[in-house]
Image (cartoon, helix red, strand yellow):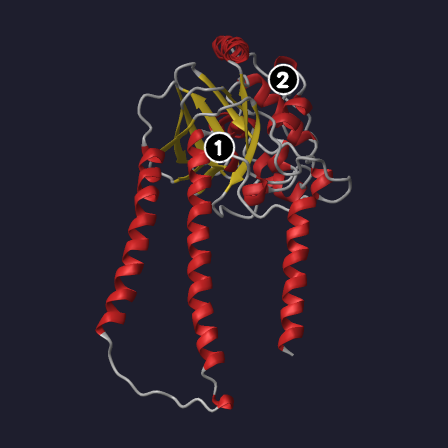
């Protein structure tokens, strides 16, 4: 029986070893791309090794004692009480082990908390279920949401390589620069987590937390919200693209140009006098659409509104749901426009895309109403 058990365990160990040597099995942390990440990785492995040694020594001694002193070989139980030497040993040795583990762990934690002298500061705000990024020095702001097609989520299409780990707007940072992340939340608890960069920090409403990283090499590093934040928690990825300094400067210039143009367009639209709308027919139940000034409302809706209104996220009324939209339509276009532009309940201003002009938002509202009557 014992030989059979030992043979089975040996086969299992050799099988696992072969899988690790020749297969693609992964039982550890992701490959680290920061110096601090390498420190965390080495600390993790060292402490796991210490725990393994303790496990082997303690359970080995226990199993040996059980086997060697079993009743079937005639061993008689010994009667003894107290042993000062043994008690000192089993107190001092664990204390020294804990000290040996605490020193490198404390040193690493202090390094993780040192956010001083950053080269770049990004404010990150978590919402259900998207991230807002604000580059404080560059005056750049955008929202980042899940880009995985709904057809993949509903198993209509084959899942892609980066299923649920792809976004419409990536965080872009330069390689070799210290990036400080200021974290908060606009609704519930979230957590910004990118394993390869060894960065994870909770985002708490009403508080600003911070963390940092310095990527060693260009690449795309993926993570996700690591704090249960509602029913779409699994649809809140984080994607960080690390690029060269030149590529980063080009990206910043492009973003500033695009957002500056959008801001100018918004200011022009807001400053222009409103044209009185012609009364609509009774069956339409609404004023003339704003699509002429805002362009294609369907396109704006698809880019900035569809994620919530297609699925009913965060209580958003679904497009085409006549019963849900009837009482809202009765409030009038001005009220709906105001909600869409300024934000209402769980909906952020302009659906989270502040680069949109008021006219574009109104066109998207017109499209929603047209499809929901």
Does 373 sit above or below residue 243?
Answer: below
Residue 41, horizontal then vertical, whole percent:
46, 40
Query: From the image, which quarter does the C terminus lie in?
Result: top right
Q: With respect to residue 55, does 310 lie above or below?
A: above
Q: CA distance from mark 1 to mark 2?
A: 56 Å
Instruction: Give the numbered dot on residue 197.
Output: 1
Q: Residues within 10 Å of mark 2 (few under 14, many from 20)?
A: few
Q: Closer to the N terminus: mark 1 or mark 2?
A: 1
Position of the N terminus, as image quadrant, is bottom right
The number of callouts visible is 2
Query: Tag 2's secondary structure?
Result: loop
Dot 1, how many residues are within 10 Å of its Cα: few (below 14), some (14-19), or many (20+)? many
In terms of image quadrants, where is residue 296? top right
Left or right, 47 with reference to 258: left
Q: Nearer the viewer, residue 129 or 202?
A: 202
Q: Secondary structure at mark 1?
A: helix
Label 1 with label 2: CB-CB less than 8 Å: no
Name the mark nearer the viewer: 1 or 2: 1
Q: Residue at x 44, y 32 (%)?
A: 125
Q: Where does residue 71 sit, x and y in percent of width and height?
A: 47, 89
Instruction: Please name the residue shown 55% across and 12% down the image.
Output: 247
The answer to which image quadrant residue 319 occupies is top right
| Residue 208 can be seen in this image | no
Could you tell me residue 283's position as x and y percent? 70, 31
Residue position for label 2: 278
Report x, y in % for residue 39: 42, 36
In the shown orientation, is residue 78 left or right of residue 340? left
In the image, farthest residue toward the left: 84
Looking at the image, which is closer to me, 230 or 222?
A: 222
């Amino acid at each position: 029986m014992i030989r059979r058990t030992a043979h089975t365990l040996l086969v299992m160990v050799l099988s696992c070893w072969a899988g690790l040597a020749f297969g693609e099995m992964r039982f550890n942390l992701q490959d680290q791309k920061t110096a601090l990440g390498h420190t965390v990785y080495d600390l993790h492995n060292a402490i796991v090794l210490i725990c393994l040694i303790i496990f082997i020594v303690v359970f080995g001694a226990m199993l040996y004692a059980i086997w060697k002193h079993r009743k079937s070989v005639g061993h008689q139980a010994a009667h003894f009480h107290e042993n000062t030497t043994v008690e000192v040993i089993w107190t001092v040795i664990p204390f020294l082990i804990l000290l040996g583990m605490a020193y490198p762990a404390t040193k690493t934690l202090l390094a993780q908390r040192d956010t001083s002298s950053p080269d770049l500061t990004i404010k990150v705000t978590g919402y259900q279920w998207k991230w807002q990024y604000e580059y404080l020095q560059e005056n750049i702001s955008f929202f980042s949401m899940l880009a995985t097609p709904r057809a993949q989520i509903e198993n209509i299409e084959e899942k892609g390589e980066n299923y649920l780990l792809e976004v419409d707007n990536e965080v872009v940072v330069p390689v070799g620069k210290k990036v400080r992340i200021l974290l908060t939340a606009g609704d519930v608890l979230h957590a910004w987590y990118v394993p390869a960069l060894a960065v994870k920090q909770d985002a708490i409403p009403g508080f600003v937390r911070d963390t940092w990283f310095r990527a060693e090499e260009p690449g795309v590093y993926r993570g996700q919200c690591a704090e249960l934040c509602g029913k779409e928690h699994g649809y809140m990825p984080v994607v960080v693209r690390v690029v060269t300094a030149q590529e980063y400067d080009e990206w910043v210039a492009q973003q500033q140009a695009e957002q500056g143009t959008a801001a100018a367009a918004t200011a022009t639209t807001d400053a222009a006098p409103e044209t009185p709308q012609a009364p609509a027919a009774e069956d339409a139940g609404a004023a003339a659409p704003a699509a002429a000034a805002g362009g294609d409302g369907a396109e704006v809706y698809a880019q900035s509104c569809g994620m919530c209104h297609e699925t009913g996220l965060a209580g958003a009324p679904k497009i085409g749901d006549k019963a849900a939209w009837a009482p809202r339509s009765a409030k009038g276009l001005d009220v709906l426009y105001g909600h869409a532009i300024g934000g209402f309940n769980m909906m952020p201003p302009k659906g989270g895309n502040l680069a949109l002009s008021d006219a574009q938002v109104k066109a998207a509202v017109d499209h929603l109403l047209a499809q929901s009557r």
